[in-house]
Amino acid sequence: MIPLVDLEGTVIFSKLVFLLISPLGTSLFLGALACLLGLFGRARLALLLGFTALVWLLVWSLPAVSVGFRAQLEADYPPVAMDAVPAAGAIVVLGGGINAPGTGYPNADLGSAADRTWHAARLFRAGKAPLIVLSGGTDPTQNLASEAAAMRILLLDLGVPEAAMVLEERSRTTEENASFSAAILHQRGVKSVLLVTSALHMRRASQHWEHRGLQVHPVATDHEARPVAAWRIWIPDTGALEASARAIKEWFGGRMFNEIKGVRRAAP
């Protein structure tokens, strides 16, 4: 088992990296650099960096840019009719859609990506797989239960029998989702899975799962690149900025995975 301190270090490092590459993080970094340059008398360069930071933040705040970028990432994973979903050995639901109960908050909170859990229940009731693996850990200092446990409660309410569910409660990142859950599935002799996660997240998630020797059938849900009223697409919006940050995280994470895999293949 991976020590908790190592998990915490990995999570914190990945959070810092993705903060830096997010539009807000990049803009804050450039803004801070501009202030430092201004203090050292580099006024022109400071002005240029400050202007760049504002433009960068503005661009990713536009719904036209945010929705367009997300649409490109989701294009390969459109909604799939239930009849077109193949049978598999297990359904795997990735965490990220439900906030687990915490101190002062006894009930789980359904986030915008809670469709993942609901869609897994639909797949199970349609007879697509006999087993559901719920993958999602928690921060023990903030939550009373894991996200996997919170998803189990929702699935029980949706009519899925407890015997059909297996919980993976250690993971805190997508890579750990795949690593820990794949070990459970290999022990059970499962070779193919229906991977359920948000469409925006599917490409990066699939890469990690396929890397661990499982046949992956993507079943994307939570499609968010939807049309925006024409008069709103060029008006900066904080929701668009937040969505842009998540999209950049998925794009960057997918590219980094491919780069690392390429380096390992090329190594003697």
Image: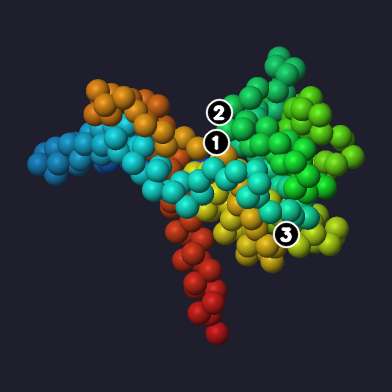
Compared across the picture, whether 69 is left or right of 256 comes to left
Spot the residue most to the top: 104
Q: At x 70% / y 28%, what residue is drawn?
A: 100
Residue 239 visible to the viewer: yes
Q: Nearer the viewer, residue 116 or 5?
A: 116
The C terminus is located in which quarter? Answer: bottom right
Q: At x 24% / y 23%, what residue is drawn?
A: 231
Compared across the picture, whether 127 is left or right of 109 comes to right
Whichever of callouts 1 and 3 sits on the residue coming sooner in the sequence is: 3
Q: Which mark is residue 112?
A: 2
Amino acid type indicated by mark 2: Ser
Separation of residues labelled 3 and 2 (CA atoms)? 27 Å
The reply to whether discs 2 and 1 touch (Cβ–Cβ < 8 Å) is yes
Q: Which mark is residue 222?
A: 1
Residue 147 at what x, y percent from top left?
71, 34
Residue position for label 3: 192
- Label 2 environment density (alpha carbons within 10 Å; few <14, some 14–19, many ≥20): few
- Note whether 71 is above or below 76 in the view shown: above
Kindly indicate the quadrant of the structure image that contains residue 221.
Answer: top right
Compared across the picture, whether 1 is left or right of 257 comes to right
Amino acid type indicated by mark 3: Ser
The N terminus is located in which quarter? Answer: bottom right
Q: At x 73% / y 59%, what residue is drawn?
A: 192
Whichever of callouts 2 and 1 sits on the residue coming sooner in the sequence is: 2
Kindly indicate the quadrant of the structure image that contains residue 70.
Answer: top left
Separation of residues labelled 2 and 1 (CA atoms)? 8 Å
Q: Nearer the viewer, residue 168 or 158?
A: 158
